[in-house]
Amino acid sequence: MKSFKRFLMLASLIILLFAVPLSAQTRQFVLKFNHVLSPLDPYHEGFLKWAKAVEERTKGGLKIEVYHSAQLGVEEDILEQIRQGANVGQNTDAARMAMYLPEIGVMNCPYFVDSPEEVAKLKKMPTVHNWLKTLEEKYGFKVLSFTWIQGFRHFMTNKPIKKPEDLKGLRIRTPGTPVWQESIRALGATPVALAFGDVYPALQQKAIDGVELVYNNIPGMRLYEVLKYVNETRHILLINFEVVSAKWFRSLPPTYQKILEEECDKAGLETTKVVFQREEEVKKLIQEKGMVIVPTKDIDLEAFKKAGEKAYEVLKVKEVKDRIWKELRKK
C-alpha cells in the first residue's frame, strides 16, 4: 500500500513538473500595435513584416496585430494606455517622449542629426541608454527600437519657401507637443497643433496653410490635391520610437522579449532603407500630379539651421545638444 502511495505521489510530481512549463509555453501573448500612417506607407509594410517574423520565431506564442491610420485611437491616448500596462504599442517620436522626459526631445529638434549613420551612433551613447532606462523604470515605456527613420521632414505649402522669412505668417500643422511646435516656430512659421488624420480637411478648408512632413506621407494623404510645393528644407531627420508597456513587456518570457526587440530593430533597419529608396518614386509621382519641388540647393539651409538654434534655447536643451554633438564629433 505504501509503495502504491509513493507511486501516486511520484506520478503527481512528474505531471506537475511537465504541466507548468507546457502551460507557459502554450499561452499566447498579443500586442495591439497602433500607428497613424496610411496602409500605403512603407512603415505599415515594415510593421507587418515585424509581426510575421515575431510570430514565426515564437511559433505563434507572441502575435502582433498592426492597426494603421490610428484605428486604436490618437497617439497621446495610446501612450497613456501603455503607461497603465495595456498590451498596446505605438509608433511615436522623441518629441512625445519629451512630454515625460524633456531632455530626450533634443532628438526631434531642427538639424539635430544628418544621417542614419549618426542615428546608429546615438544607439551606443550612455546618455541615450540612460534616457531609455528612465523612460522604462520611471514612466512605464519600453522602447523596443529607434532604428526606424522616417526620412527628412520638409515644408509643403502653396508658395515656394527658400528662407525662414518666407514662412512668416504661414500656419503650419504640427503634432501637439512643445518640441514640435517650438521647432517649427523657430524656423519661421506659426505652428498649429492638429491630429495627423485631420490634415487633409484642414488644408481643404484653409484652416492651415501647409504641413511639414516626409515625402512618403504625400501619396497616402493625397496632399498633391491640396498643396503645390515641396520645399526640401530637410529640417528634421525623423527618428521613430517603437514603444510598448514596460509592465507588459516584463510579463513576456525572456526569449519572447529578446525576439520582440531583435525583430523590431531588424525590421526598422530594413524599412529605413525602403523609405529612402521610395522617395525617388514619390518625387516622380507627385511631379506628375502637378507638385513642384524646390530642391535643397535652392534653399538657404544655413539660415534655417541658424534659426533652428532658437528651439534648443526655448526648450532648454542646448547644453544637451552640445554634449551629444561633441560625442558625435560634429564639432
Image: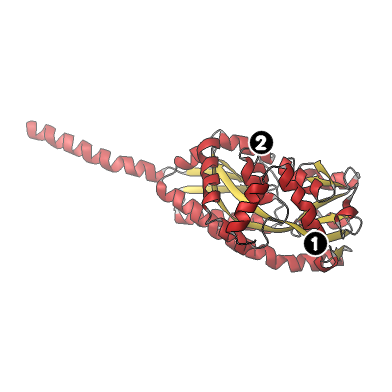
Q: Quadrant of the N terminus?
A: top left
Q: Which residue is mark 2?
A: 77
Front residue of 17/274: it is 274
Q: Residue at x 36, y 41 (%)?
A: 23
Q: How is the image coloured?
A: secondary structure
Horizontal arrangement in the rendering, residue 301 relative to residue 166 (left or right): left
Q: Residue at x 66, y 63 (%)?
A: 115
Amino acid type for the residue under numbered disc 1: Leu
Q: Residue at x 33, y 43 (%)?
A: 21
Q: Which of the 4 image quarters holds residue 118?
A: bottom right
Rendering coords of residue 5 (x, y %): 12, 32
Amino acid type for the residue under numbered disc 2: Asp
Q: Which mark is residue 321?
A: none
Rendering coords of residue 173 (x, y %): 81, 46
Q: Which residue is mark 1?
A: 301
Horizontal arrangement in the rendering, residue 261 relative to residue 79 (left or right): left
Real-space Cα separation, disc 2 to disc 1, in angstroms: 36 Å
Residue 143, placed above or below residue 282:
above
Front residue of 317/263: it is 317
Disc 2, disc 1: CB below 8 Å? no
Rendering coords of residue 157 (x, y %): 87, 54
